[in-house]
Amino acid sequence: MTREDFVGYAVPALTLGLGLCAWEGVVRYFAIPPYLLPAPSVIISTLITDWPTLSSSLWVTLSITLKALLAAVVGSVTLAVIFAQSRLVERAFYPFAVALQVTPIVAIAPLLLIYLTPSVAVLVCAFLVAFFPLLANTTLGLSSADHNLMDLFQMYRATRFQQFMLLRLPAALPYFLAGLRISGGLALIGAIVAEIAAGSAGQGSGLAYRIVESGFRLNIPRMFAALLLISVAGITIHVLLTAFSHWLLHDWHESERGREA
Amino acid sequence: MTDYATLASQSGQAASKASAVSLVAFKSVDKVFANQVTALSGLDLEIRAGEFLALLGPSGCGKSTVLRLLSGLTGPTRGDIVWSCDRPEFGFVFQEPTLMPWSDVFHNVWLPLRLAGTSKEKARPRIEEALAQVGLSGFAKAYPRQLSGGMKMRVSIARALVTRPAVLLMDEPFAALDEITRLKLNDDLAALQASLNATVVFVTHSVFESVYLANRIVVMAARPGRAVAEIVVEAPGPRREGFRLSPHYAEACRRASSALHLAMGEAPPGERLE
C-alpha cells in the first residue's frame, strides 16, 4: 500500500470515527435517553442482542432484492434484445415501460397487494423499480455500436447473428453494467418501500417492517440497528456490482483507464 | 469473367502501371443520398489492376462515396460500375482505426476471417503474417487502448490485409495522425504495396501524400462531386524517403496542387502572384 492509498483510507475512517465519538459524547454528556437518540454503543449492543430477529429480517430483504434484481436483468435484457431487432417493436412497447417507471412505486403497491400475496407484491415492486434503468441502458447500448464497424461487418458479409454477438452485444456491455449498478441500489429501495407499504407481519417480514414495528413500540435503538443493516446492505451491493463491472471492463474500457500521473 | 489474378498478371506485363489493364470502370455514375444531397454527378473513373490510385480533393467531393460504391456498401443512383473480373476480395481501412476496443489485437485482426468461418487455429498463421507486414509482431495480446494512434492504424491495416485482398480501399487512413507518424506509415505503405501486387484506392486531402504514394492521382471537385483532372506520377525508383527530394516529386506536387486549386475554383498559386 502506498502512502497515498494509506491517506486515502485513513482520512475518511478518521472522520467517521470522530463523528461517532462526538455522537457518543453528546448523548452521554447531556444524558439523552435512548428512546430519543440512542448512542452508537447502544445501537451496536442492540444489534447484537436482537441479532436473531434482525438477521432473519435482513435475509428476507436481501433475498427479495436479489431475486428482483435477477428478474430485472433477465427481463430487461430479453426485452432490449427484442427492441434491438425492430424499431417498430421498440415503439410499440416503450410507453408501457415508461408508464411503469414514472408511476411512484408507493402508489402501485396497495393495488398489487390486492391482487397478490404480500411477499409476491413486494418482489414485484422491487422488480419494477430495478427494471427500467436496465432496460433503458441496455437498449441504448445495443444501438450504440460504431457505425464504421457496422459497415465493416456488412462489407465482410457478416450474418445478423454474427453482427449481434460479435459487435452489438459487446458494445452494449458497459451500458448494461452502468444500468446494473443503478438498478442494484434501486432494487433495495424498491423492496424497502414496498415492505413499508405492505406492512406484512410474522415470519417472512423484512427490515423495513422491523423499522415500522419498532417505531410503534418506541424501540428506537432497534430502528437505528435495522437502518444500519439496510445501509450496510446497500453499500455491499454497490461495492460488489462495481467490482463485477471492473472485472469485466478493466482490460479495455475507457472508464477503467487509470490517469497517468 | 476472369479472376483478379489473371487480370493482375496481364497488368504486370504492361509497359507501365498507367497503361495497365482496367479493373473496374465508373460510367457516368450519379449518387444522390436520401436527403437529396448529390454526392457524385456524372463520374467517369477507371481503376487499373495493380495500380496505386489516389483520389485527391476537398471535403464533400464524394471521395469516400467512391469507396463505398466500390465495396458494394451502397449502389449508384444512375450509371454503371463495370468490373472486368469477378468481384474481388476487399480490404478496407477507415480514417479512424475502427477497432473493437473489447478485443485484443489478435482478435481484431482475426475478424474478417472469423466472419468467413475460419477457426482461430487455422487463421493464426495468416494473422501473424499480417501483423508482421505492418511491423506489429509481438503485439497480438495488446488491447487497442494500450496502443498509440499510429499503432492502432497499423492494426487496422493488418486487419484489412489478413484476407489477402485484391483491392485495398483506404479512406484518409492517416489524416488523424501526427506528421512524423504519418510519414513513417507512408513509407511502410509504399513498401508494402510494392510487395503485395494489390490494387490500392487511397482517398486523401494531402497533395504530398498522394504524390508520394500513387502511380496516378485523380483530382475531384465538390458540389457536385466529379473527377476533374488526372495526374500520372513518374517515379525513377522505389518510393523511399529520397523520392521526396527528386525533381519528379516536386513536379508532380506542383501539377497536383494546381489541379486541386482549379478544382476548388481558385487560381493556381503560381499564377496568382503575377
Image (cartoon, rainbow, N blue to C red):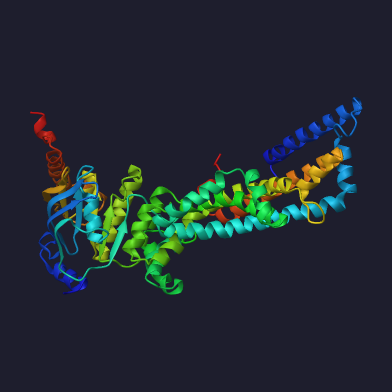
* Residue nearest the viewer, comparing B67 with B76: B76
* Residue nearest the viewer, comparing B227 with A116: A116
Residue placed furthest toward the front: A114
B101 is higher (above) or lower (below) than A106:
below
Q: Which residue sits at x=41%, y=71%?
A: B123
Image coordinates of residue A33 in percent, x first then y, are 90, 31
Q: Which residue sits at x=31%, y=51%?
A: B173
Please state, as top left, top right, bottom left or bottom right, where the C terminus of chain A lies in the image.
top right
Total numbered badges shown on the rendered structure: 0
> Is B106 left or right of A243, judged from the image as shown?
left
Image coordinates of residue B94 in percent, x first then y, are 32, 53
* Residue nearest the viewer, comparing A167 with B88: A167
Tell me, yes or no, if residue B159 can be seen here: yes
B132 is higher (above) or lower (below) than B271:
below
> Is A134 left or right of A12, judged from the image as shown?
left
> Is B41 left or right of B149, judged from the image as shown?
left
